Image (cartoon, rainbow, N blue to C red):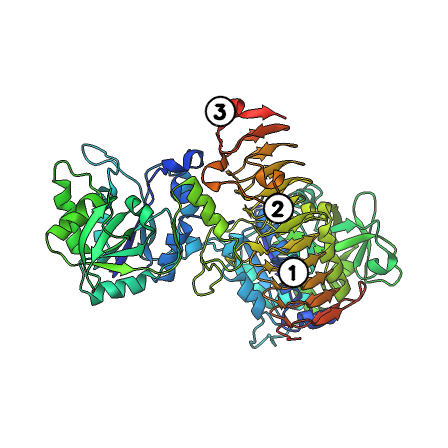
Amino acid sequence: MVAKKCVAMLLAGGQGSRLGVLTKNIAKPAVPFGGKYRIIDFPLSNCTNSGIDTVGVLTQYKPLKLNSYIGIGQPWDLDRLSGGVTILPPYMKQSVGEWYSGTANAIYQNIEFIEAFQPEYVLVLSGDQIYKMDYSVMLEYHEENQADLTIAILEVPWEDANRFGILNTDDNNKIYEFVEKPQNPISNKASMGIYIFNWQKLKQYLIDDQNTIGSSSDFGQDIIPKMLKNNDRLFAYPFKGYWRDVGTIQSLWEANMDLLEKSPELDLYDPDWRIYSRNPVEPPHFISLGAKVSRCIITEGSIIDGEVTHSVLFSGVLVGRGSRIVNSILMPNVRVGVNTIIENAIVAENTIIGNDCHIGCLDALNKGDTLCDASNDITVLAENLIIPSKVRINKGAMIDTDNLKQNSFEL
Amino acid sequence: MRDTMGIIYTGDSNISLQELTLFRSVAALPFGGRYRVIDFILSNMVNSGIHHVGIITQNNYHSLMDHLDSGKQWDLDRKRGGLFILPPYVSHDNRGWYRGEVDAFFSNMSFIRRSSYKYVVISGSSMICNLTYDSALEFHKENNADITVIYKEEKKATKEELSRHTLLQTDDNNRILDIEVMPSNPKSDKVSMEMYIMEKQLFQFLVEECVARGLHEFSKDILIKKMDKLKILAYPYDGYLAKIDSIQSYYHHNMELFNTENFYELFHRSGLIYTKVKDEVPAKYGIDAKAENSLVADGCIIEGQVENCILFRGVKIAEGAIVKNSIIMQDTEIQDKAYIENVILDKEVIIRKGKRLIGQANYPVVIRKRAVI
């Protein structure tokens, strides 16, 4: 095996239970985003654009779609002779098998994989964030500081600080305090869950942690506090730019809508920093005579006969004549019949909606252009549903096959 | 069709495509918003289960090679078979320039001989359609044909349109009785699609014999001359067909795709059409954008007004710009308040603020690659 300076380990095993029915059958990193991407395209593209060509993807929850999506990594140029992308599911050992019990445990169980490349550094990433970042700059920073661990941080609004790992640094960005999800945050410098470790150091901590009774085997809870206690060199790497954790329905919806701004903070057009994805084999999208489109994203393979405003449409979406799509996200191959209104909704892959339906909050239609309160009014339809014609589904509902009947009302 | 290989001849130069083929072969001409002409033939072969395809190139084949790359997008990066690009070369018995398609086949005979397939599908590269060759090959075998020519009956075509094609006359058993290449008085509406099926051995023999006699054209020097000695049959295709041989036909066939039936026939009939992946961002419409009856590829940013247009990947239409009945190729930019009607803009063209460019429906204006207006 050719030695690699830095190996990336991408934690993609989380269920993402806060995304409700959207992650019922797929892992969170496989959730579609931004018209043609899936969340995992961002860290994978960042890796390949940063010159990191060896990536282990740790999967656990509902991995089928994620595995087939990643394949041999060709869309991200990660089909390599040496290294490339490797999917690392939990596996049986001689006497027992065990699941990944925590973020650190997941890496621990793959020490052999990392050792094969004899890296100096290991980059740990999570699979549920939307951002562009050059990890090679962070790695340089890590080397300059002769750090044992570098944590990428950004300043978050104080009221959100209790959802993150919060840390304090001196003037040289050396970390002297770290608290995971604190009740009373000491600062608003939040860990982004992006770490660069010196591999030999990390390996020792992982082995020690495995032998520590009662440890939750989590980087934020266990490994980082222990390193801090032992006076290791921990540095914060301040990140500037667009970064969103899309772990909730609301944040996923908002991050999609952010792309509709005239010049979005997240620039997807940079030719030097393409976000790669598995491209569908589809013809260009077709806007028919009488259709209306404004402030929206539409992907190849879609056919629009109706009206689409302030929405994100993935590939292969059909919108029938007289239908109106407002403030919504329609994931791949969603079909909408005629004269149906969908507002403030997320519709997952392959769901078919009949004619003359009303889905979600209809404020913009009833009261001119005032928007709903997006925070709790987003309606979510699971994948592969068939919504019959002339049905109303109320705002804020989260619909799956088992509760479709009691939540759909005749019009 | 594991026992069949494909050969695509892309050597035709076509002066009536003017500036569009200045820098590229017809096969590499952009079509339908995100494709090049060759994508259709190549995808048809792949969708038929043909996994060994040789592409003979001659004129300006740089952009074609760039487009095809390793054949990965057509699933043709294979250990067994795969995609072979066959450019002209110079050797003691080869002058490097083909005098006709048969000469081109002859020059690449070692590639053809080396491949161990029983049948060969030969195709030109100016036809756009969506078909698979399975049933034609089946027909060929069942009828013990020596050569099968695929054709389409163009019942609605005018005399003028027909006279641009090679036309077949057949009997009730599909046997070809006569062939005329671009006749001024068409006697048939059966248009040869320039696609032929035969046994590889026979193909080798015919090519070698033809070249030995100093002749070089497949239709004129092989098909017509062998009509009596060989069993040459015609196999009908009834889907969408477009032949790209002039600015008018190029413009017309692109505009034809707004018809839902044509659209489905071409993109979904027998299989998917593959092309080079560019990883573009999905298309984005601005707050004042208006779009109707248009095909729009990924990577476009539309702030202005678009009507009856084909927009290739990465086209930018600024606020206040109006674009009608036009074909706008990759990465072309139309700045604010420009007005474009009945125009074909090649790649990377810039139309500056407020400029007006108007062609006629039967004679669109063509603007060459990288022009700034």
For label 1, the SS is loop
Dividing the image into 4 quarters, which one contains the N terminus of chain B? top right
Residue A295 x, y percent position in the rendering: 58, 52
Disc 2 vs disc 3: Cβ atoms closer than 8 Å?
Answer: no
Residue B249 x, y percent position in the rendering: 76, 61
Residue at 11% x, 55% y: name it: A231
Disc 3 vs disc 1: Cβ atoms closer than 8 Å?
Answer: no
Q: Nearer the viewer, residue B102 or A187?
A: A187
Q: Nearer the viewer, residue A174 or A3?
A: A174
Q: Would residue A2 be seen by someone viewing this image from the given angle?
A: no
The residue that mark 2 highlights is A308
On the same chain, marks 2 and 3? The answer is: yes
Q: Would residue A28 be seen by someone viewing this image from the given angle?
A: yes
Residue at 75% x, 49% y: name it: B233
Query: Which residue type does callout 1 highlight?
Result: Gly
For label 3, the SS is helix
For label 2, the SS is strand
The residue that mark 3 highlights is A403
Residue A321 x, y percent position in the rendering: 69, 40
Q: What separation in Å lies between label 1 and label 2 (alpha carbons)?
A: 16 Å
Residue at 75% x, 46% y: name it: B236
Question: Is B182 rendered above or below residue A21?
Answer: below
In which chain is the residue bearing label 1? B
Query: Which residue type does callout 3 highlight?
Result: Asn
In which chain is the residue bearing label 3? A
Left or right: B162 with respect to B370?
right
Is disc 3 surrounded by few (<14), some (14 to 19) or many (20+) residues within 10 Å? few
The residue that mark 1 highlights is B304
Q: What separation in Å lies between label 3 and label 1 (alpha carbons)?
A: 43 Å
Tell me where residue B353 sits by quadrant: bottom right
Residue A196 x, y percent position in the rendering: 24, 56
> Upstream in the sequence, badge 2 or badge 3?
2
